[in-house]
């Protein structure tokens, strides 16, 4: 099954850049491809490189990877709740507070990558297992309406967005 792309009105406008970062075609195949892309991009870094910040006050690469983990977990959970027909409003989360509390720099990069891979594998299983009617279910997340169909695209596009930042701002400074 190829999941159709969400249309305006199904998601908050602030998420449009994430949807734009996902190429046309099978979002599940794109999510699957990122399973190899993230470790290929970050897995060869030394621990000191993974602790690099490209500017003062910016996250380290480990913080960024932890942010991908946290966001994937939140998006998957929201997708599951809304996909299952739960209409309970779901709260937002403060990404900087999560990053500060996670202490990602205390963890080995290999552990963070393993957690990200396990989580993405679980997200794919969850999304692939949702029945067709679930994708049009609407819920409230962070105070705004959103359909279940959006969440695989949010996971994929959010990851693509941050990988672009890694390639443009982090990796050139590490060479």
Image (cartoon, rainbow, N blue to C red):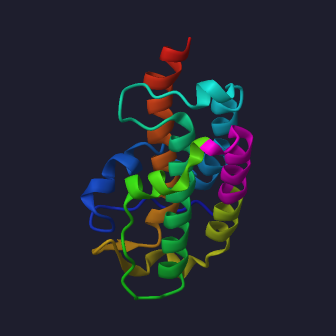
The relative height of residue 124 versus residue 86 in the rendered view (above or below) is above
Magenta region, residue range = 106-120
Q: Is residue 114 magenta?
A: yes
Counting every numbered tag in the picture gives 0
Instruction: Please give the name of the residue rendered at 55% of the width and 76% of the height, measured from the top-left corner.
Output: 80
- Give x and y (percent) for residue 49: 60, 24
- Give x and y (percent) for residue 100: 45, 52
The relative height of residue 150 versus residue 89 in the rendered view (above or below) is above
Instruction: Please give the name of the residue rendered at 58% of the width and 59% of the height, measured from the top-left corner.
Output: 2
Quadrant containing the N terminus is bottom right
- Give x and y (percent) for residue 36: 70, 39
- Give x and y (percent) for residue 10: 33, 68
Who is closer to the viewer here, 96 or 22? 96
Quadrant containing the C terminus is top right
Q: Main secondary structure of the magenta part?
A: helix
Who is closer to the viewer here, 110 or 134? 110
Instruction: Please give the name of the residue rendered at 48% of the width and 24% of the height, measured from the top-left corner.
Output: 170
51 lies left or right of 139: right
Q: Which of the 4 image quadrants contains residue 120?
A: bottom right
Instruction: Please give the name of the residue rendered at 43% of the width and 24% of the height, measured from the top-left corner.
Output: 169
Who is closer to the viewer here, 5 or 15? 15
């Amino acid at each position: 099954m190829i999941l159709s792309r969400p249309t305006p009105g199904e998601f908050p406008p602030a998420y449009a850049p994430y949807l734009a970062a996902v190429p046309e075609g099978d979002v599940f195949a794109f999510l699957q491809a990122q399973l190899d892309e993230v470790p290929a991009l970050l897995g060869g870094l030394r621990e000191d490189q993974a602790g690099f910040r490209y500017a003062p006050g910016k996250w380290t690469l480990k913080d960024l990877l932890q942010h991908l983990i946290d966001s994937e977990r939140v998006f998957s959970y929201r997708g599951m709740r809304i996909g299952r027909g739960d209409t309970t409003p779901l709260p937002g989360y403060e990404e900087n507070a999560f990053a500060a509390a996670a202490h990602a720099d205390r963890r080995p990069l290999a552990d963070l990558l393993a957690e990200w891979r396990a989580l993405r594998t679980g997200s794919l299983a969850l999304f692939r297992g949702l029945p067709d009617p679930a994708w049009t279910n609407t819920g409230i997340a962070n105070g705004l309406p959103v359909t279940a169909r959006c969440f695989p695209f949010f996971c994929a596009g959010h990851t693509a967005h941050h990988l672009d930042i890694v390639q443009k701002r982090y990796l050139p400074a590490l060479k």
